[in-house]
Image (tube, helix red, strand yellow):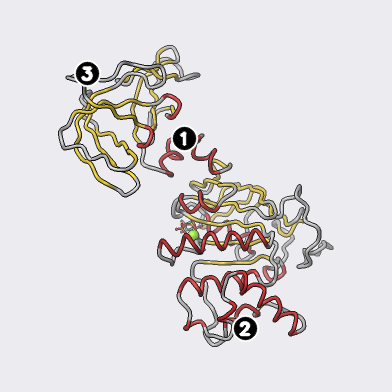
Amino acid sequence: MKHDMPQPGPERTQVNQTVPRLEIRNLSRAFGGQVVVDHVSLKVMPGQVTCLLGPSGCGKSTTLRMIAGVEMQDSGEIFVDGQLICDTVFRVPPERRHIGLMFQDFALFPHLSVGDNVAFGLKGPADRKRARVEELLDKVGLRRFIDEYPYQLSGGEQQRVALARALAPKPRIMLMDEPFSGLDNRLRDDIRDETLEVLKAEDAAVLLVTHEPEEAMRMADEIALMRNGKIVQQGAPYNVYNAPVDRQAVAFFSDINVIRGKVQGALTDTPFGQFLAPGVPDGAEVDIVIRPQHIKLDLDRGGRGPNPTVQDGVAARGEVVRARFMGAESLVEIRMDYDGSVLKATVPNVFLPSLGKPLWLMIRRDRCFVFPAAGA
Ligand SMILES: Nc1ncnc2c1ncn2[C@@H]1O[C@H](COP(=O)(O)OP(=O)(O)OP(=O)(O)O)[C@@H](O)[C@H]1O
Ligand SMILES: [Mg+2]
């Protein structure tokens, strides 16, 4: 079937901030009857970075490959600047999508100089190509290497050349699949930040795949949390972190503590006092989920803890079973008197109480999340 559709071209027209640069609607894909991408929809605006964040095997790379056009969806549509580029009938081939790709196993051409690597996808007169190559190598801080060969560069420098190469044809969209995972930590932070600056300056819409929450928090304007082929939550990093949709969403970003309780009259009684459980029927169980940095510790006062407060509720007693210094904070594990379970708390800087020391724990009402009990 032939469609007479306008094709997205590489020319940069006025950036329209209301039309998403990239939009996918209800994209699905199954392999051998197993659905791995399940009605995924998202939008990325020009100059914005969206992170597709999720555990291994949840369908992130498959989603990216469909957008790139190297994998075909079973259903759903892909739009660039409001124009359909792919549904199940019509399909712009990958090389005409003007999408830049940067994957973990990026490979520079070893027999080409840095400058020729960056120029690889460029067309047109030699002086224009040269100017674009110099502009990009300037941006990634590697202009002096223009006539060197890839083997003469460090891993991080090669990564930046790969970025320059992907950006050279001015892609409207950059798809990045764990592009920083081959680098050591310190280098990675620097390269992430530099990459972001370059991408924003080029006004590309970026869809970045990662399974590391820290990377997503650092890079993203928006995080799309993916699990079992579905996007379970989408929003600004602050919102996804502070208003998680379920217990797994909390656990994806940090260690968690869970306290189980039974609901009576929209309240649940726990050793830490009562918690609100609005809308939960009587007799149902809930999980009160709290991150280690939001547990408050207090010292023992001759067998007593602090007096109950509205904000912190009742304090519960436990004894230290482990304390470790982690650099920016200390991690203390406490075995609770009420049922022998171990809760984790982090404290800024150095706090290394001796083993067996009694401590009183409190849970801030505005920092915990109450969900229907998992598996209940
Ligand atoms: N061509 C294929 N044929 C069969 N199964 C596939 C194919 N491509 C992917 N899968 C399966 O689809 C699921 C999702 O794979 P995908 O590569 O999208 O995961 P991912 O989220 O990128 O994981 P990771 O973080 O490990 O890279 C996996 O179970 C994988 O085995
Ligand atoms: Mg992958």
Instruction: Work out whether residue 277 or residue 69 is closer to the camera in this orientation and state it.
Output: 277
Q: Secondary structure at mark 3?
A: loop
Q: Residue at x 54, y 59 (%)?
A: 193
Instruction: Work out whether residue 109 or residue 367 is closer to the camera in this orientation and state it.
Output: 367
- Please, which residue is most extreme toward the bottom here? 111
**In the image, is residue 60 above or below residue 288?**
below
Q: Residue at x 75, y 80 (%)?
A: 128
Instruction: Please provide percent x and percent y for residue 218.
Output: 51, 51
CA separation in Å, label 1 and label 3: 35 Å
- Horizontal relation, residue 302 to residue 97: left or right: left
Looking at the image, tell me whether mark 1 or mark 3 is earlier in sequence order. 1
CA separation in Å, label 3 and label 2: 72 Å
Query: Where does label 3 land, which residue?
Result: 304
Q: Residue at x 46, y 40 (%)?
A: 249
Query: Where does label 2 land, which residue?
Result: 116
Query: Where does label 1 land, which residue?
Result: 246
Label 1 crowding class (10 Å Cα cut-off): few <14, some 14-19, many 20+?
some
Amino acid at circle 3: Arg
Q: Nearer the viewer, mark 1 or mark 3?
A: 3
Quadrant assignment for the C terminus: top left
Instruction: Please provide percent x and percent y for residue 281.
Output: 45, 17
